[in-house]
Image (cartoon, rainbow, N blue to C red):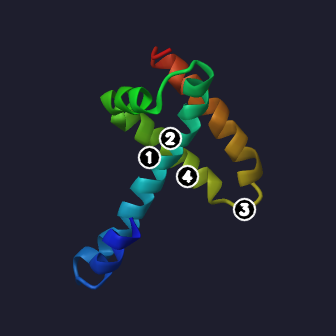
């Protein structure tokens, strides 16, 4: 990811998009990480989980965005990370994938 974002910093108009790209990437990564706990407990492969998540990408991306924002607040992140794991499990079950 850094190999993509560093050259974009030097292009005048695209340099503004780098923080947005980083935030979207971290939101998707947090969604993958937190939903993976439920998938691992049910012996679902990472590939299958990722393909299932792509079907409702906006839902998972908004969950990851909320988790990323909550994790960025000092001291609140101590509670936000376990809550994100529980929320990822609940989201996975709510989507009916398990």
Residue 28 is tagged as 1
On the image, the x and y values in percent for residue 50 come to: 40, 33
Residue 31 is tagged as 2
Residue at 50 percent of width and 44 percent of height: 64
Separation of marks 3 and 4 at Cα, in angstroms: 12 Å
Crowdedness of circle 1 by 10 Å Cα count: few (<14), some, many (20+)? many
Separation of marks 3 and 2 at Cα, in angstroms: 20 Å
Crowdedness of circle 4 by 10 Å Cα count: few (<14), some, many (20+)? many
Crowdedness of circle 3 by 10 Å Cα count: few (<14), some, many (20+)? few
Determine whether label 3 and label 4 are within 8 Å by CB. Answer: no
Dot 3 corresponds to which residue? 74
Determine whether label 1 and label 4 are within 8 Å by CB. Answer: no
On the image, the x and y values in percent for residue 2 come to: 40, 70
Residue at 23 percent of width and 82 percent of height: 11
Separation of marks 3 and 1 at Cα, in angstroms: 21 Å
* Horizontal side, residue 57 vs residue 85: left or right: left
Dot 4 corresponds to which residue? 68
């Amino acid at each position: 990811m850094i190999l993509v974002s560093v050259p974009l910093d030097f292009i005048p108009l695209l340099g503004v998009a780098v923080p947005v790209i980083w935030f979207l990437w971290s939101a998707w990564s947090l969604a993958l990480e937190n939903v993976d706990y439920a998938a691992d407990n049910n012996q679902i492969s990472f590939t299958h989980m990722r393909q299932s998540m792509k079907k409702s990408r906006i839902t998972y991306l908004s969950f990851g965005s909320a988790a990323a924002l909550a994790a960025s607040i000092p001291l609140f992140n101590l509670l936000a990370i376990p809550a994100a794991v529980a929320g990822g499990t609940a989201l996975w079950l709510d989507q009916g994938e398990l």
